[in-house]
Image: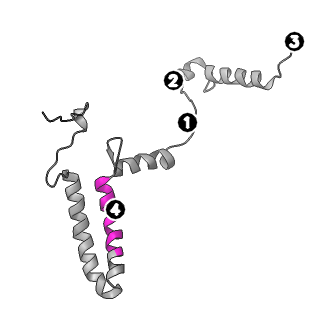
Amino acid sequence: MPYVNVPNDLSKIKTKMAFNLTKRQLICFGGAAAVGIPSYLLARSAIGNTWAMFLMLAVMLPAFLLAMYEKDGLPFEKVVRNIIRARFLRPGVRPYQTQNIYAPFTGRGDAGKEDAIADRKATKQARPRRKG
């Protein structure tokens, strides 16, 4: 009796449309062919067959990358978006800050308990310890 391997997580299984490719892969490969083949046919008379082939590959590679690359279940554009957000758009250091909505009623202004605790920690670190 043949043995069939069944994955534990069935949510990772993707529906295959044609040629054992997903719909996303079919669309990306179709778009790559729609852009790459005409670029080859138009460029081969001007720059030769070899360089036209390299041009076609360079034009088609981004679509292949979009179709095939996946990390942690996320497609390529979502991975790139997350990297851009984490590295460039959001601050690297996010200090702990609170806003006391009761400050106008207590008369202390913005300085509150958090500032007092931070000042106390700073003075403890500044004092040298005695060796006993």
Residue displayed at 24% across by 76% down: 38
Q: Name the residue that disc number 2 marks.
A: 101
**Looking at the rendered structure, which numbered label has been put on residue 132?**
3
Give the residue pinned by disc 4: 62
In this picture, is 103 found above or below 10? above
Q: Residues within 10 Å of mark 3 (few under 14, many from 20)?
A: few
Q: Is residue 4 left or right of residue 110?
A: left
Across and down, in percent, residue 100 comes to 54, 24
Kindly report which numbered mark, 2 or 4, lies closer to the viewer in this rendering.
4
- Give the CA distance from mark 2 to mark 4: 51 Å
Element carrying mark 2: loop
Residue 65 left/right relative to 111: left
Say which label, 3 or 1, has the lower sequence index.
1
Q: Give, as a three-letter code, the residue at label 2.
A: Ile
Q: Earlier in the sequence, mark 1 or mark 2?
A: 1
Circle 3 or circle 1, nearest the eye = 3
Residue at point 67% right, 21% down? 116
Q: Residue at x 33, y 57 (%)?
A: 65
Residue 99 vs residue 70, the one in the foreground: 70
For the record, the magenta segment spans: 54-68
Q: Is residue 67 magenta?
A: yes
Q: Residues within 10 Å of mark 4 (few under 14, many from 20)?
A: few
Amino acid of disc 4: Pro
Which residue corresponds to mark 1? 94
Disc 1 element: loop
Q: Earlier in the sequence, mark 4 or mark 1?
A: 4
**Earlier-in-chain disc, 3 versus 2:** 2
Residue at x 20% of width, y 57% of height: 26
Q: Are marks 1 and 2 in contact (CB under 8 Å)?
A: no
